[in-house]
Image: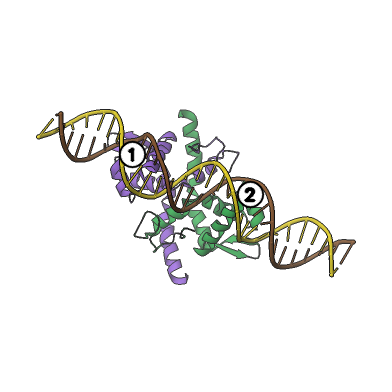
Chain colours: A green, B purple, C brown, D yellow
Amino acid sequence: MTATPKPGTPVRGSTTGRPFMAALDLLGRRWTGRVIWELHQQPAGFRELQRRCDQMSSSVLTTRLNELVEVGLVADGEAGYELTRLGEELVEAISPLQAWSRRWARTLARSG
Amino acid sequence: MTATPKPGTPVRGSTTGRPFMAALDLLGRRWTGRVIWELHQQPAGFRELQRRCDQMSSSVLTTRLNELVEVGLVADGEAGYELTRLGEELVEAISPLQAWSRRWARTLARSG
DNA sequence: CCCGGCACTTCCGAATCAGAAGCACCGTAG
DNA sequence: CTACGGTGCTTCTGATTCGGAAGTGCCGGG
């Protein structure tokens, strides 16, 4: 498996390991954002999470969960998988994206 | 090529086409976030952009640029490729990620 | 005409992903 | 005890996507 991107470690496309680049790399993997978002809505076990992510493949879900645990965004607790404090902070950091995406939809609807 | 994710269109992993899911899908492609970020720093032509993105492959850069133009985030102007207003708003929407990534780095450095 | 730079495009091997199937481990019911 | 359903993976195969080198066509200058 490809190395999980972490700040301080050189990642795909950046030899410096700048935290922001590592974050872009981590988020730039299929399903990563979605998994984080769903766990923010509600902690869940493996299968429920898989259902909520439109039946994403179990093999990818396994690797995503491992990656996210490894970098401290997700923990395996009593309620199943759940976001850590850091994970919740990430959700807050990308939550403006929600409002933006609605603007995007409106703009595209008018002109595209 | 896979369809470019757009709000209102069913996208990979979501039959509803909810704008936010489309945004997560779009950003969840390799290099997309980075390309947007670099264009925000400074508009650039194809080759300069490729250099600034750590020599990402030209084939992928071409498809990313086409996708981003298609969904109205990037335009091909006088200074080369540049973000549209919508694109700049997206950068603002994800800019909290910068501060977060630094917290992430500090936290991992202590405990990971 | 020749050269260099640019913006791609094409090709192919490698990495990643999707999807189905299967496995081992519970806890409960019989 | 055995059977059974649910869970969290793991494995496998084929499709998609990515990486990287090479090539193409189009300027503009000399």
Chain containing the residue with disc 2: A
Q: Which of these two is toward me, A25 or C12? A: C12
The three-letter amino acid code for the residue at tag 1 is: Glu
- Kindly tell me whether residue B73 is visible in this rendering: no
Q: Which of these two is toward me, C20 or C26? A: C20
Residue A40 occupies quadrant: bottom right
Chain containing the residue with disc 1: B
Tell me the residue that label 1 is attached to: B82
Using the image, determine if residue C8 lies above or below residue B27: above
Whether callout 2 and callout 1 share a subunit is answered no
Spatial CA span between label 2 and label 1: 36 Å
Which label number is shown at residue A52?
Answer: 2
Q: Which of these two is toward me, B36 or D18? A: D18
Residue visible at 44% across and 61% down?
A6
Residue A64 occupies quadrant: bottom right
Residue visible at 34% across and 44% down?
B39
The three-letter amino acid code for the residue at tag 2 is: Arg
Using the image, determine if residue C3 lies above or below residue B27: above
Instruction: Give how far across and how far down residue B98 sits, in percent.
Output: 40, 55
- In-image side of D15 versus B65 (left or right): right
- In-image side of B62 versus A34 (left or right): left
Residue visible at 42% across and 44% down?
B90
